[in-house]
Image: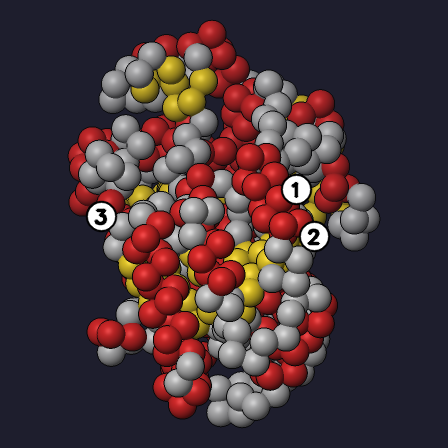
Amino acid sequence: MKILFVTAEAYPFASTGGLAGVTGSLPVALERIGHTVSLIMPFYRDIKNLDNYDWIGDQFLTSAGEKFGLAQTVLPGSNVSVYLISKDEYFDRPGIYGPDDASAYQDNAGRFSFFSRAIASFQENLKETPDILHCHDWQTGLVPAYIRSFRKPAVVFTVHNMRYQGNYPPEEFSFTFLPWSLFTIDGLEYFGTFSFLKSGIVFSDQITTVSTSYAKEIQTPAFGESMDGIFRKRSGSLTGILNGIDYEIWNPSTDPAIEASYSANAIGPRKICRNELIRQHNLERNPDGMIVGIVSRLTEQKGLDLLFPIVGKLIQEGLNFVILGTGEKRYMEKFKELSKKNPGRISVTLDYDEEMARSIFAGCDLFIMPSRFEPCGLAQMMAMRYGAVPLVRKTGGLADTVIDERDNGFGFVFDNADPDELLRTVLRARGLFGNRRKWTWLVKRCMKQDNSWSSRAEQYVKVYRKAVETRRRR
Ligand code: GLC
């Protein structure tokens, strides 16, 4: 099939988190199983600075008559063409959604509705119309509305996180150039605003989200972020497919960013990576002390505040922490304070640093993700691949990828977003950590889990076929 990925971010060109990880690797996985895949995204200033692209031209027009330019490059390690939509007034500025992680540009409704219009006309100008437009998250939610009356392509819309919806006041509706007849409850209208995300859900042929548990959860009020009703209406067209990670890129036996190479069958050298982690972060050397790793966006979603009331106790119990992440100020300040108060015990790096992330996955013993909700989660898969045993809250993709050792699994799972439960579970892990043979067995089992894209890419192909069928029957 011919598939065009539509996204506001893709690794390595522009990334704020998991979304870019998926849009930067799933196309390659689909290409490996024989499909023709390309991707289209905005030409942000930071990409322009990279300089390794070909300029196609600036003569392109949206249906509303707006001019735009186009550049082209490829996804590293593949033949996936990446088209970059150039429009300086919207994209030649710092960052993606705002100048930094914490703030959003005032004209995002204008920027991303323009982006979506540009895509609608771009795909018409291709020599061959793609079979599928695969759109990701709210930023691309208007694309299916723009092409709602086209016979081709079919649209698959993937929700990576319900929390981000792109809802804007009616005064900004004119930016979309859509008819007011769509500003209704069956269209984009959403509690008096209009919603990019809702548009994506309502007008696509098929919808997916990034785990089977999350696909169920978002049909309930607790996780649906007030859109559960819309999902229940479309539940027949909604499929949960777990994300994967690229097992070539995330591979402890070839990764140049880590201190030593190892694999599930030759695990010995992992110790070298652990020692290196201790050295780099100036942790106290305590042979029995378990090292807890955290690599995360620091937002409410991730549940890291559950640690605050219990971290003192865990330090007393001999655990050390290596924490890497950036995000909301309140969390960054609290973690900085904790590291200042506990030198040699808690190392905090407030940054997004992939090399350091790799060294944490390779060196820590226990990797924790106490998320309040987690559509899929990628870090737990990376951690397992590198032999860090995951401890997670039972939600979304975490529930689908980690099985508790008590249930014959290979990790630690707790049910409620409650500090005491988290404490008990970490201490349970620490208990097993004391049993070297059992722990090594857990580490190996984690490393043997298959979270690669291979089987999951096939599941997308099935959804693509369904979408083509749905569109044909319209
Ligand atoms: C979002 C979700 C995360 C998911 C990622 C990729 O970042 O919060 O759970 O893994 O998207 O789908």
Q: Residues within 10 Å of mark 2 (few under 14, many from 20)?
A: some
Q: Is residue 320 visible?
A: yes
Q: Is 471 rendered above or below residue 243?
A: above
Is there a contact, CB below 8 Å, between mark 2 and mark 1? yes
In front of the other: 465 or 172 = 172
Is ligand 1 less than 8 Å from the beta carbon at label 1? no
* Rendered image quadrant of residue 414: bottom left
Quadrant position of the C terminus in the picture? top left
In front of the other: 456 or 267 = 267
Residue where numbered disc 2 is placed: 73
Q: Secondary structure at mark 1?
A: strand
Residue 19 is situated, as x and y percent measured from the top left of the image, at 50, 48
Q: Which tag is nearer the camera, tag 2 or tag 3?
A: 3
Residue where numbered disc 1 is placed: 84
Residue where numbered disc 3 is placed: 216
Residue 32 is situated, as x and y percent measured from the top left of the image, at 50, 70
Residue type highlighted by circle 1? Leu
For the residues labelled 2 and 1, the Cα–Cα distance comes to 8 Å
Residue at the front extreme, as displayed: 316
Q: How many marks?
A: 3
User: Which residue is rendered at x = 36% and y = 58% of the image?
Assistant: 423
Q: Secondary structure at mark 3?
A: helix
